[in-house]
Image (spheres, rainbow, N blue to C red):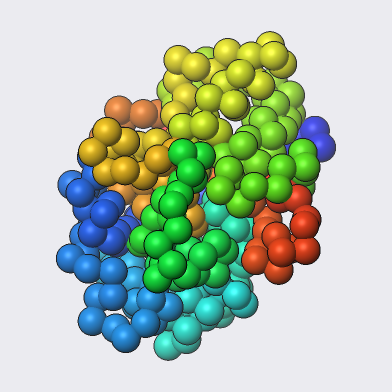
Amino acid sequence: MKKLGKQTIQFDNPPTILETASIVGPKEADGPLAKYFDQCLDDELWGEKTWEKAESKIIKETVNSVIAKSGISSDTIDYCFAGDLLNQCISSSFGLREINIPFFGIFGACSTFVEGLSLAAVFTESVAENVLCAASSHFCSAEKQFRFPLELGNQRPPTAQWTVTGAGSAIVTKSGTGPFITTMTTGKIVDMGIKDANSMGAAMAPAALDTLITHFKDTGRTPNYYDAIITGDLGYIGKDILIDLAKLQGYNIKSNYNDCGVLIFDKSTQDTHSGGSGCACCGTVFSGYFFNQLRKKEIKKLLLIATGALTNSTTSQQGESIPGIAHAISIEL
């Protein structure tokens, strides 16, 4: 592999995304992408006593599913990268404590899934044969940690997004026939001073712009190189902001750009306000919908940019702003 510009790595022997799996909650199951997910749950608790235990079960079963679908033994998986939104990444560490695979717990907020894919690609290019990555989130566990307990019944403003309940996972392998991870562009922390925890799309859009422009400059590519440019969870408001900001920089992305948070719910019928968010937003939409499109060759060149808000309840209470981060990978056939 070699470095391009300041933040991009190009892979000499691009690793293959061998298989993916996804599990989603009941609200996501009522959305327009339901048929692309491996399993849709009937309720948020899935037989567990707490939301946190339910999320751990979701990521555990999603990982078991991707291993089973891949046809390879878990003994041949060299490393696992996984993360979530909860303190100390407890959903991943508790859910995967019996997996018996060398484990890296990672945190990039809602950018975690692409962060995991990026690291998996680096490891398979260098020292590993197979690497597993996964990310999860849960509406009920995230809401009470980042905003308000559900029991309060707080009114959500139009800018608010709905944290996706679910998990996405993928196995990246050294050899294969694609889809290939050809480049990765690691994002920088970008903070524009936004403090509203109910306006995450606006807080993350500048970071998405920075990574997007950097990727184009580092690789020499333009928006029309890709069949699709997809962000993780900017939602409707963040999506519009990114389109406008990119246009100001001389890049027109409107024709081939969309956002996972826009795609996963039906805005007209599901009352999710500005769309979806959470680690599972990008994780499930890519692992379900976009991987299917790549497999069918309906998309041959995809730029996937996962965005994250690097905040928690403590920093919000202390009056801090919300820093954003965005990581990108290009996936090609």
Q: Position of residue 309 (x, y in %)?
A: 64, 51
Residue 11 position by quadrant: top right
- Classify the position of the C terminus by image quarter: top left
In this rendering, position of residue 310 left or right of residue 278: right
At a point 36% along the width and 61% down the height, the residue shown is 165
Instruction: Name the image quarter holding residue 169.
Output: bottom left
The structure residue drawn at horizontal position 71% and vertical position 64%, both measured from the top left corner, is 317
Residue 290: % across, % down: 35, 40
Q: Quadrant of the N terminus?
A: top right
**Considering depth in this image, is 161 or 289 the residue closer to the camera?**
161
Q: Residue at x 68, y 56 (%)?
A: 310
- Where residue 18 appears, as percent x and y from the top left, is 38, 54
In this picture, is 1 found above or below 279? Answer: above
Relative to 330, 77 lies left or right: left
Q: Height in image: 273 above or below 140? A: above
Identify whether 293 is placed above or below 277.
Answer: above
